[in-house]
Image: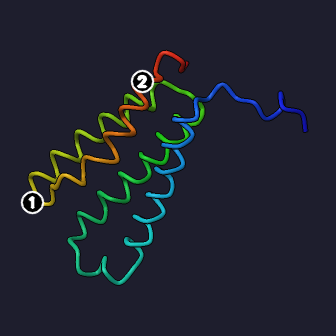
């Protein structure tokens, strides 16, 4: 395989946040399908499943360098923060990783189609 065949125009920072995001989604799925989820409100489980599916689509879009993925992920972040605050589940940690992902996405948005 030649270098040209594996070379992409994707910045390393996008590759990193997509990888971290997908790993995070696996963590969420592990929790959702564990015994812990039986102790949580079913509406929260539904929300997490839907959010995870949308997040996965966004990471796929960022991987493919699509602008829509940054817009949708930012909107999802806002909705999740409002819901976390409203339900008493908000903490500084709910902002940290998504904020880094959003920052990297917006920093590279001009390189996206």
Neighbourhood count class around disc 1 (C-alpha, 10 Å): few under 14, some 14–19, many 20 upward: few
Count numbered badges in the picture: 2
Outermost residue, bottom direction? 35
User: At 43% from the left edge and 30% from the top edge, which residue is drawn?
Assistant: 105
101 lies left or right of 18: left
Q: Percent from the top left, x then y, of residue 98?
A: 33, 44
Q: Which mark is residue 88?
A: 1
**Residue 107: which numbered mark, if any?**
2
Pair 1/2: label in front: 2
Q: How busy is the neighbourhood of tag 2: few (under 14 within 10 Å), some, or many (20 plus)?
A: few
* Rendered image coloring scheme: rainbow
Label 1, label 2: how many angstroms apart (C-alpha)? 31 Å
Judge whether 87 appears above or below 32 on screen: above
Vertical placement of residue 16 versus 106, above or below: below
- Identify which residue is drawn at 40% across, 64% down: 28
Relative image position of residue 72 (x, y in whole percent): 37, 33
- The percent coordinates of residue 92 (x first, y second) are 19, 52
The N terminus, quarter of image: top right
Q: Residue furthest top?
A: 110
Rendered location of residue 70, percent (x, y): 41, 30
Sequence-wise first label, 1 or 2: 1
Judged from the image, the secondary structure of the residue bearing numbered disc 2 is helix
Residue nearer the viewer, 13 or 71? 13
């Amino acid at each position: 395989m030649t270098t040209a065949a594996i070379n992409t125009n994707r910045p390393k920072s996008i590759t990193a946040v997509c990888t971290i995001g997908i790993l995070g989604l696996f963590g969420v799925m592990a929790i959702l399908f564990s015994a812990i989820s039986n102790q949580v409100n079913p509406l929260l489980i539904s929300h997490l499943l839907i959010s995870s599916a949308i997040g996965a689509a966004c990471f796929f879009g960022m991987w493919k360098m699509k602008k829509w993925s940054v817009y949708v992920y930012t909107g999802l972040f806002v909705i999740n923060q409002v819901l976390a605050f409203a339900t008493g589940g908000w903490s500084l940690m709910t902002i940290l990783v998504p904020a880094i992902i959003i920052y990297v996405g917006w920093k590279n948005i001009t390189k996206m189609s």
